[in-house]
Amino acid sequence: MPSTLLDTCEFREEIRKSRFITLAGPISSPAEAQQFIERHSDLAATHNCWAWKIGQQYRSSDDGEPGGTAGRPILAAIEAQDCDQVVVLVIRWYGGIQLGTGGLARAYGGGANKCLQQAEKRRLVSRVDLRCSCTFSELALLKLRVAEVDGLVLDEQFTANGVDVQIAIGEAHIEPLQRQLADLSRGRILLERT
């Protein structure tokens, strides 16, 4: 199951006198990826190479390095770490020693890989929005059951008869949760898709 990053992370290394700084961060849109790249790029550096991936969308840039030696290896590292909704920027200051195309690909891909390996991650869970109604006394148990299946309580509206609740849970958990809530409420709590 794919993961995204909890926060921005950084990895630094020197390879044959060239300095590399790798920065990675979570994103939710191509515009956010571009903002991350613009905010963290160093215009004094020799190259600012990057890649990002959001679902089936992805982009990469070699920023003047030989074609396919920077952006694609960074993107391959994102995919190898099973990451999604992630941007990775590798900044290079040339140290005077040629690395060759293989060396460049290893340096850019390896830096991205090491940065993503050490980053704190969270799993990306696809959730379905549902709604239901319960009594005041059932609300705490309903929230507990939703939390047990890694679900979210999106909204609560208190009414004269109880509480209208909007939740989001994974598709695989809908049926078991429905059974639990029906048992809890003697069949009164019914989950409906929104």
Image (spheres, helix red, strand yellow):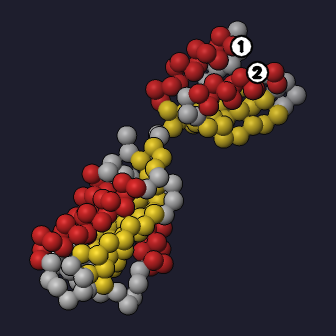
Q: Amino acid at mark 2?
A: Glu
Task: Point out residue 45 in the picture as x, y percentages from the top left corner.
Answer: 34, 86
State if disc 2 and disc 1 touch (CB < 8 Å): yes
Circle 1 crowding by C-alpha within 10 Å: few under 14, some 14–19, many from 20: some
Which is nearer the eye, 174 or 8? 8
At 29% from the left and 75% from the top, the residue drawn is 14
On screen, residue 103 versus residue 95, left or right, reads left
The Cα–Cα distance between marks 1 and 2, rounded to whole angstroms, is 8 Å
Quadrant of the drawing holding the N terminus? top left
Circle 2 SS class: helix
At 58% from the left and 19% from the top, the residue drawn is 178
| Residue on which the image places disc 1 | 185
State the mark number for residue 138: 2
Task: Point out residue 93 in the picture as x, y percentages from the top left corner.
Answer: 30, 84
Q: Amino acid at mark 1?
A: Ser
Along the polypeptide, which appears first: circle 1 or circle 2? 2
Examine the image and state in which quarter residue 124 appears.
Answer: top left
At 32% from the left and 72% from the top, the residue drawn is 13
At 65% from the left and 10% from the top, the residue drawn is 183
